[in-house]
Image: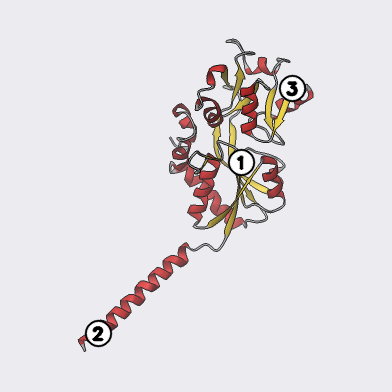
Amino acid sequence: MLTFLLSASIVFFSHSMATAQDSIVQKNTCEKRYVISFQDDAPGFFVDKDNKKNGTAYELLLEIIRRLGCKSTEQVNSYLAARENMARNKTDIYALGTPDEKFEKTSEFVEMYRIPRSLVISKKVADKNSTIETILNNPNVLFGNVIEGRLFIKESEQTDLRLKHRLRDFPGPALVFKALLDGRIQATFSSPAFTYYFLTRENRMENFVSIPDGDGEAIISGFYLSRKRLSEQERASIKKIIKEIRQDGTLALVAKKYVNPVDLKYYQPENQ
């Protein structure tokens, strides 16, 4: 009789544990595989010397997927290709981007953070009295930009420079900064992460001057969520996660790897 009761207890306990485990699995199981997209350019995404994937956009996208409890398929594109894929309903989430009317035709922009911009310019054409305005008006200065995008440059500035044949377009930020280092352009607008990755980190800043745009509007950076591939409920869940990533300090932890310590204040929770 004791043996029977013991066996029955084991069976009941095992069944209860299995039921509990099934419940946990079902709760955390996500059937959907999200298609995440990011530019094939540092500091948003790059592969280090140990063949490990890194980057601000890459890490933040993976964190969103982790918190959703889902799996993902990665799209690594140029900015133009990423926007085309979103327009053709091939992408769920893109990061990191700035407000773009063409992107917003098929997707919803969700802000992650705001950062100041600066103008990085060669010392060969800048002096201690140089300002953003004087450099923009200097006919001998060529600027770099991303094809079909705005690398922290205002639309009005872009239009004016293009009319004067002083704007050179490149497929991505890495090639913009390479042209700057090679002397094929003399200036580009930048952000804390871009300046750190391409110049400060490589000890190349000695040949350049960074002029902060103290009076300018902050540059907004965030995610694009597909309106057609994602339901309103899905977008609401992702937007909630994006807000939590900022507020719980995760954004600052990610940014710590990619910006100078003095610039971490732009990535801290909004109430700090």
Q: CA distance from mark 1 to mark 3?
A: 26 Å
Q: Amino acid at mark 3?
A: Arg
Q: CA distance from mark 3 to mark 2?
A: 87 Å
Q: Which residue is found at the position 65% from the left and 29% from the top?
A: 176
Q: Amino acid at mark 1?
A: Asp
Q: Which residue is found at the position 62% from the left and 26% from the top?
A: 189
Residue 21 is situated, as x and y percent measured from the top left of the image, at 39, 68
Disc ID at residue 237: none
| SS type, badge 1 | loop
Q: Quadrant of residue 124?
A: top right
| SS type, badge 3 | loop
**Front-most of 137 and 3?**
3
Q: Which residue is found at the position 61% from the left and 32% from the top?
A: 174
The reply, left or right, for residue 262 in relation to residue 73 is left
Q: Amino acid at mark 2?
A: Leu
Disc ID at residue 166: 3
The quarter of the picture where the C terminus appears is: top left
